[in-house]
Amino acid sequence: MTTKYHQLLILDRPCKYCKVLELKDLQHGGKMRHDQHNNPYVDFGEVEVTEAMNAEKGTTVLMAIDALKSAMSTEPKEPKVLPKSELKLGYQRSDILPNLPGLATTANQGCAFCKVLRDDLISANLQDGTSDTEESCAKERAIPMEIVITEVTYQFREFETGSELHEDDPKIWLDSLYVYFTVTSGVENIEKSLHYNFCTDASDLCAKWFSLGRLPVVNDRLSAPNLDRIKALISRALEEKPIENVHQEFLPTRLLDLESDCSSGLRLVVTKGDPEISKLDPIQKRYAALSYCWGYAVAWALDTSGSMLYALFREVKKIGTRNHFQCRIYTQIASLHCVIEGNSCLSGFLEPAYSPPTVQINFQSEIHKSISGALYLRMLHPPHETLKVFSEQIGKPIGKPDNPSSADFEEAAWEERGWTFQEDQLSPRKLYFGKRMAYMSSGKLCEAADGTRFSRETYVNMENTLGQTLSGWYNLVKAYTERKLSFEHDKLPAISAFARNICDRFPHQKYFGWPLGI
């Protein structure tokens, strides 16, 4: 079936292989526990770390473990015990590449997971990379190859060490479903894996039962669910007090990117066909909204009307020299609430991201009969990017939990550009728009639209001493010089807000050639 916002496939007619995906928590040794707030959750116990488990981590990890043992006391220690983080479902079947007729048969019989898995295995180009030459690789693609699915597992993750956990709280959370398989290429068997992330609605009973905080995300950036999620993040951000202003209460405004790929040079407020914008020269286009963004006047705060922008454009023409205008803009920056988005309206956060179907698995607990709900499976990245390959060095093809913010931030234009650098660092509240989802950062709140947390490197710490602040200046400048500037002579004003920030925090000082009270 297809919902209003994404394609949803319900696993209501699983084949004999996929029947095991309907997790039986009691059969896997699950027991009901209660957290400090008396919420029930499932606990699958603990396992003793064995040599075989360490061997799965690869030779690199094994060498590090051996080196650590040699450096420490040789006295025998108690075996290491960890929360059980993997549930093996006993899923095994074989098929033939490239068409996978076995999976096609069960998919046509109504098995939703077989349909998704077959499409993803084909898209992953499993027959590529198994030969040294293009000619031999092309020949192998034409020759049927056996693929054996050796196991499917429910993968749990331990909560981060820094998390403040009560002794009664769950130690692990449900993360993903891993599919392990081998592809036979001549005499070589190559072990690989694909995985799908679990998510569920916050109100679903499965959320607390499996300690699953990841929420479903809709690709349509302007859909009602996405907008509601963004509004909720903004409301939480307003409760944070990330920066104490030295002089006056700051009025949040919107930051616009004026060097985008849109022909107008402006986004989100003025369309590319606007006749007034087209008459302006490049300098006026670039700086018109900046004076609007950094103003303190109540009349300008949170107002994106066309008439207000036109009034500002007319004011820009009266200001005179460009240097005067730059000085006015950058010496008034204190802190701001900014919205920074991707490459442009159509190729940035509004561009449809990778949009795979979602598989819904209906869950009914055998331990606690009142616990039931829906778990959703979905790939974050395309199959060829999700594919992991076994090697002796890295071991079993499993990695860290998927981090959407890492990819979204690395691919964003504002991550490379100089004039967004200090805005990103100094803004008390930041709402980022990536191709996959939105992200809110404000004080201790760093949360993505799917409910997962993310981190951003910061060079501004309001609790740092003067010495620590000056020491961090060098790392700040190094990071800034790696950015791109549309106008090379903007290097000084594009970091002036950092100097202004330091002057406000440490008055009656002079730094880096900046005059007192800049």
Image (tube, helix red, strand yellow):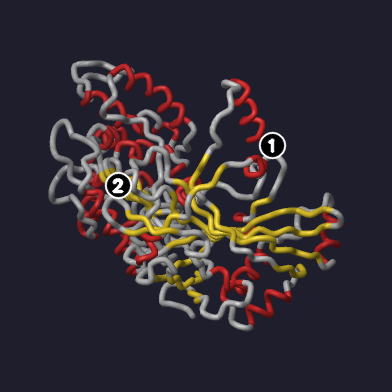
Say left or right for 377 vs 105: left
In front: 362, or 237? 362
- Provide residue 366's location: percent of width, then percent of height: 44, 69
Name the one closer to the observer, 247 or 378: 378
Circle 2: is it few (<14), some (14-19), or many (20+) Cα within 10 Å? many
Q: Is residue 517 left or right of residue 323?
A: left
Q: Position of residue 176 (x, y in %)?
A: 52, 57
Does residue 431 appear anywhere in the picture? yes
Which one is nearer the viewer's eye here, 275 or 206?
206
- The residue where tag 2 is placed is 338
Query: To which quarter of the image does residue 161 belong?
Result: top left
Q: Secondary structure at mark 2?
A: strand
Q: Amino acid at mark 1?
A: Thr
Residue 450 appearing in the image: no
Residue that sits furthest to the bottom in the current view: 109
Mark 2 residue type: Cys
**Count of numbered badges drawn on the protein:** 2
Q: CA distance from mark 1 to mark 2?
A: 46 Å
Horizontal side of residue 343 vs 87, given as left or right:
left
Residue found at x 45% / y 67%: 375
Looking at the image, is mark 1 or mark 2 earlier in the sequence?
1
**Which residue is depicted at the point 56% across and 43% down?**
48
Where is mark 1, residue-wise?
59
Q: Residue at x 54, y 37 (%)?
A: 80
Quadrant of residue 500 within the rendered picture: top left
Viewer-proximal residue among 374 and 491 = 374
